[in-house]
Image: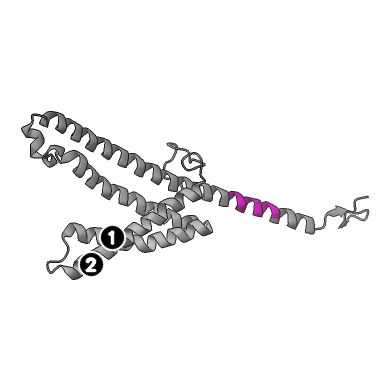
Amino acid sequence: MDCFPKLLDPTESFLCCLSLTVGVKLLMWPHLVLVLYTVATAIENLIGEDNGPGASQLFETLWSLIGVPVLFAGLWGVYHRAEPHVRLYWYYLVASFIIDLFYIVNLFILQDACVHLKLEEAAHGGQAFACGVARSISTTAAVVSIIVALYLIYIVWSWCEDVDSSQGSDAIASLLDLADGIALKKPWRCPDRLGGTGNCQIH
C-alpha cells in the first residue's frame, strides 16, 4: 500500500545508523508509556477533582485510551513482522500528528510569547529584544517539533513498506518453488512409435 505514491522512497535505516525495526521500537515504547501516563493522570484528576476534567483533557484521555490497544498491536506487529498491525499504528500516529499540530501552532505561533515575559525586563527597556528572542524560540521549537514528528511518521511508513515488499517477494519465491516442485514431480510425456505417448527418458 503506497501512502506516499511517487513522492518519497522508503528509507533503509533510522538516523542513518540503526535499522528501521530498532527505530520503530524506539518510537513505540515511549509512545506507549506516554499514553499510559496520560490515562493514569486523567484517572487521578477525575478522582481528586469534584468538577471533573475539562473538554480538552477528556478528549486527550479518550484518544490515549484508543491508542493503548493500537500500540500493543503495533508492538506485536513489529516483533512478529506483521505489517497490518504496524500500519494501523501508522494511521493512529498520523491522526495524532494532525491533532497535535493544532496545539503546536496554537501554543508556539498563535499565542504571543511576549505575554509570558517578566515585567522587570520591560522596566529596564529590554522588552523589544526579549520579545524578539521569545518569538524566535517559539517559532523554532514549533518547526523542530513538526520536523521530528514527520520524520518519525516517515520511519514507520518505511518499515511498513519494507516488510510489505519483502513479504511480496517471499510469496513470489514460494510460488516459484512450488511450481518447480510440481514440474519435477510431473513425468514428461513423449510420443512413441505406435502413435501413443510414453514417459520420456533422458539418456
Placement of 86 over or under 20, stated as above or below: below
* Residue density around tag 1, few if under 14, some if 14–19, many if 20 or more, within 10 Å: some
Give the CA distance from mark 2 to mark 1.
10 Å
- Residue identifier under label 2: 44
Work out whether residue 160 can be spotted.
Answer: no
In screen coordinates, is 134 left or right of 198? Answer: left
Q: Residue at x 92, y 56 (%)?
A: 194
Return the residue nearer the eye: 23 or 132.
132
Q: Amino acid at mark 1?
A: Thr
Work out whether residue 178 can be spotted.
Answer: yes
Q: Give the overall secondary structure of the magenta segment.
A: helix
- Residue identifier under label 1: 38
Q: Is residue 170 magenta?
A: yes
**Number of marks present in the image shown:** 2
Magenta part of the protein: which range?
Answer: 168-177
Q: Residue at x 20, y 44 (%)?
A: 107
Q: Residue at x 68, y 51 (%)?
A: 176
Residue 36 x/y as whole percent:
33, 62
Q: Secondary structure at mark 1?
A: helix
Q: Residue at x 19, y 35 (%)?
A: 134
Q: Amino acid at mark 2?
A: Glu
